[in-house]
Amino acid sequence: MSALFNFQSLLTIVLLLICTCAYVRAFAPNFLDKYKTGFRGIFWKCARIGERKSPYVSFCCIAMALSLLFWS
């Protein structure tokens, strides 16, 4: 089944995208700062969400990990 049709898989992919973009931006800021618009701007926006909302993102990652371990 595609991740688009399974809500839990879609949330996992979105969380992984946000965390990965924030990690890449922490080590190579020029890599994502060049593209603030267009298709590549999505990665810049995900990095900003990961930086600014990091307590909420980390809580969602922990909740997703617990749900995958105990309820799947």
Image (cartoon, helix red, strand yellow):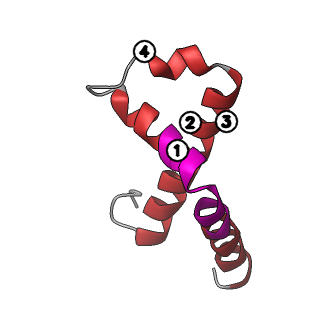
Where does the magenta region start and end?
Answer: 47-59
Above or below residue 23? Residue 16 is below
The residue singled out by tag 1 in the image is: 17
The residue singled out by tag 3 in the image is: 23
- Residue 45: image quadrant is top left
- Left or right: residue 53 versus residue 61 is left
- Left or right: residue 23 versus residue 30 is right
Quarter of the picture containing the C terminus is bottom right
Image spot of residue 3 (x, y percent):
41, 57
Tell me whether circle 3 and circle 2 mark residues in contact (CB < 8 Å).
yes
Image spot of residue 43 (x, y percent):
44, 33
Looking at this view, is 42 or 66 the one in front?
A: 42
Please tell me how many numbered marks the rendered image carries: 4
Amino acid bearing label 1? Leu
The CA span between labels 3 and 2 is 5 Å
Q: Residues within 10 Å of mark 4 (few under 14, many from 20)?
A: few
